């Protein structure tokens, strides 16, 4: 069945595609034949001309029938498809032939992020510049644009714009504006920006333009959207995103205003800000910097500016703020503050005053550091004696005497700082009670050691240690009539392990009055890796551990001058370990001698100190006095270490 004729897109029947062609074919003069009348079948072996099948199609229908040309849905019917050698999309048998005339592209959509566009007005030489620009502005109103470097080259008028949105608006003007001579203004768009040669004339123009932008009362220079400056835009392309132009402008500014305090570089399409490292070298007094509405995509790009002592920064409008920190304001402020610690204002927001430690340059002298700090002298004396006794026993072969150091209902917990090499703390991690790591309430309770026996049993299983005394710091955090809170930090070395690692520790003790002394009610031990500087100081310091200081004290007591001593020495039952009035030997030597006497006699710190003080710091006399009184049974039990901590 022949296919029914159908209307084409213009409303007329297309007889060529669906009806027989009754026209007379043109033949050679030597063989005239009337195809319309005689219907003589002639076979030609000539190849059909490319794209010209109007002579072939009627013959195909004549010899093969109408069914060969129909496109029915019967799969059993034989379908014949003829293709010419030309495979272009515009062939007459191609579906593209039904799509009508090709329309002009109405929008620019170049791959990538084009920032500058060249606008070409065909035959623009026939019209005045003001007429062309005013006609375009009137058509796209209320939108507007600033033409950069308007020039007439040959028959074309050319200028540049800096926005894809503006370029699309101008492209919509193509053949929409009628000129007085009844022609249409033709607009062409392509990405690109002009080149600008740097010469003395340009330098002079730049100086004049920047002089108008400088505010002497604020010592500030406004270079925002510099490529739109009205004094430059007609003849020069002064875009600061070009490194050459940026360096030229900054060189001129540094020469004229070396003490500049505020600089505005907003809206200059800056994407690579490496050249801004020049600011730190040339503008030592710069405190305010605006670089908003540019193309900065990563926060690390600001590293070139981190040496600037900025107090105010504007970064809003950059992709790094709009995309990466869109809903993370706190992280945004924190990351910027890491690079500019003195920043007080960010994107117009007032920031809290930063906590700084580099105040020496502001004329404020930092107080000297102290290894021991306490306002209460009596509490400090108790804490020093208590800690020295505690760590002396802790570093000994047996920690069982520490039973008397803990309260019957004492609490103890161990934490380990999270770090990439936490596996090096494998002896401690099973009992790590870090609250950020352990969310299970029952496990937290299990890891909290409660009671004197569980606490001492646990610390006795920890690796043997040697604490470095010169690394110690001690703070007295709180003092009441019955309680003292002591925080001790320092380093120790593990003994008996394969690597004998050096650890950093932070121990907080809450000691309470118990009988005639003090005992530990609560303790927290925190472990971490030492810094390289701390580790070097610990290793290189002589006579650093408690054992080493005791040995040094025994060696040095021979240098203490012998003094006349009473024939009989008496140790009072109530010791008064005061160092007031003691001038010789010095306090360091006194401490060493006290530790040495503690090691030999097993007396506690108070009684060892009192013994040496009464014999005028003569070590040999102190040993003889101790032996004499010990054999006579005149030394009370509370003078010994196992009874001194509680």
Image: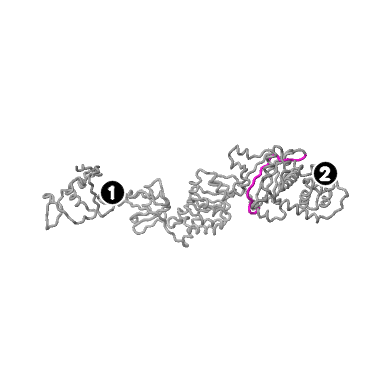
Residue depicted at 33% across the width and 52% down the height: 186
Image coords of residue 618 (percent x, y)? 82, 52
Check whether the beta carbons of the residues at disc 1 and disc 2 lie within 8 A of each other.
Answer: no
Please give the name of the residue rendered at 47% of the width and 60% of the height, measured from the top-left corner: 202
Q: Residues within 10 Å of mark 1 (few under 14, many from 20)?
A: few
Crowding near the residue tagged with mark 2, few <14, some 14–19, many ≥20 C-alpha atoms within 10 Å? many
Scheme of image coloration: one colour
Q: Which residue is denoted by mark 1 in the rendering?
A: 96
Residue at left offset 23%, top offset 48%: 80
Residues shaded magenta: 516-534
- Image coords of residue 590 (percent x, y): 78, 51
In the picture, measured across the screen, residue 369 lies left or right of residue 12, that is right
In magenta stretch: residue 531: yes
Q: Is residue 2 left or right of residue 176?
A: left
**Can you name the residue that lies furthest to the right here?**
567
> Looking at the image, is mark 1 or mark 2 nearer the viewer?
2
Occupied quadrant, residue 572: top right
Disc 2 marks which residue?
635
SS state under label 1 = helix
Let me know if residue 64 is in the magenta part: no
Q: Which mark is residue 612?
A: none
């Amino acid at each position: 069945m022949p296919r029914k004729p159908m209307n084409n897109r213009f409303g007329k029947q297309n007889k060529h595609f669906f009806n027989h062609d009754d026209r007379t074919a043109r033949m050679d003069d030597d063989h005239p034949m009337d195809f319309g009348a005689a219907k003589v079948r002639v076979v030609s072996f000539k190849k059909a001309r490319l794209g010209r099948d109007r002579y072939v199609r009627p013959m195909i229908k004549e010899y093969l029938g109408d069914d060969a040309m129909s496109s029915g849905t019967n799969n059993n019917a034989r379908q014949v498809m003829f293709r010419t050698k030309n495979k272009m999309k515009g062939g007459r048998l191609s579906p593209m032939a039904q799509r009508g005339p090709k329309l002009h592209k109405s929008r620019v959509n170049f791959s990538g992020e084009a920032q500058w566009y060249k606008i070409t007005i065909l035959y623009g030489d026939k019209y005045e510049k003001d007429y062309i620009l005013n006609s375009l502005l009137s058509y796209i109103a209320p939108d507007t644009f600033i033409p950069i470097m308007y020039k007439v080259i040959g028959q074309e008028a050319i200028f540049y714009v800096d926005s894809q949105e503006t370029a699309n608006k101008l492209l919509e003007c193509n053949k929409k504006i009628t000129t007085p001579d009844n022609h249409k203004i033709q607009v062409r768009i392509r990405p690109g920006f002009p080149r600008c040669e740097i010469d003395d004339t340009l330098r002079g123009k730049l100086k004049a333009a920047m002089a108008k932008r400088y505010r002497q009362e604020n010592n500030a220079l406004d270079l925002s959207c510099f490529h739109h400056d009205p004094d430059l835009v007609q003849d020069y392309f002064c875009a600061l995103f070009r490194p050459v132009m940026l360096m030229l402008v900054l060189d001129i500014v540094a020469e004229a205003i070396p003490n500049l305090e505020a600089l505005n570089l907003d809206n200059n399409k800056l994407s690579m800000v490496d050249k801004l490292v020049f600011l730190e070298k040339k503008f030592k007094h710069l405190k305010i910097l605006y670089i908003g509405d540019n193309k900065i995509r990563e926060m690390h790009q600001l590293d070139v500016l981190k040496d600037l002592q900025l107090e105010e920064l504007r970064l809003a409008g950059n992709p790094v703020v709009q995309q990466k920190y869109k809903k993370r304001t706190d992280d945004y402020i924190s990351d910027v503050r890491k690079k500019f610690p003195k920043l007080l204002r960010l994107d117009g927001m007032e920031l809290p005053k930063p906590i700084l430690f580099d105040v020496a340059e502001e004329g404020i002298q930092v107080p000297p550091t102290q290894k021991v700090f306490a306002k209460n002298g009596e509490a400090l004396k108790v804490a020093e004696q208590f800690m020295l006794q505690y760590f002396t026993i802790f570093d000994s072969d047996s920690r069982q005497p520490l039973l008397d150091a803990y309260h019957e209902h004492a609490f103890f917990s161990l934490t380990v700082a999270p770090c990439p090499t936490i596996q090096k703390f494998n002896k401690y991690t099973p009992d790590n009670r870090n609250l950020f790591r352990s969310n299970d309430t029952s496990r937290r309770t299990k890891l909290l050691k409660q009671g004197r026996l569980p606490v001492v049993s646990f610390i006795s299983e920890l690796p043997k240690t040697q604490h470095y005394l010169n690394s110690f710091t001690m703070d007295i955090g709180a003092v009441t009539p019955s309680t003292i809170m002591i925080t001790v930090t320092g380093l120790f070395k593990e003994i008996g392990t394969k690597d004998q690692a050096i650890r950093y520790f932070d121990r907080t003790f809450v000691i309470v009055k118990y009988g005639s002394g003090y005992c530990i009610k609560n303790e927290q031990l925190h472990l971490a890796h030492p810094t390289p500087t701390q580790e070097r100081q610990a290793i290189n310091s002589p006579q650093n551990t408690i054992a080493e200081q005791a040995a040094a004290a025994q060696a040095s007591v021979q240098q203490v001058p012998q003094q006349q001593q009473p024939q009989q020495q008496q140790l009072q039952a109530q010791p008064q370990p005061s160092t007031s009035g003691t001038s010789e030997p010095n306090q360091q030597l006194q401490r060493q001698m006290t530790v040495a006497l503690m090691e030999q006699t097993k007396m506690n710190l108070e009684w060892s100190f009192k013994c040496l003080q009464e014999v005028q710091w003569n070590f040999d006399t102190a040993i003889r006095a101790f032996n004499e009184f010990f054999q006579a049974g005149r030394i009370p039990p509370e003078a010994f270490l196992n009874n001194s901590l509680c």
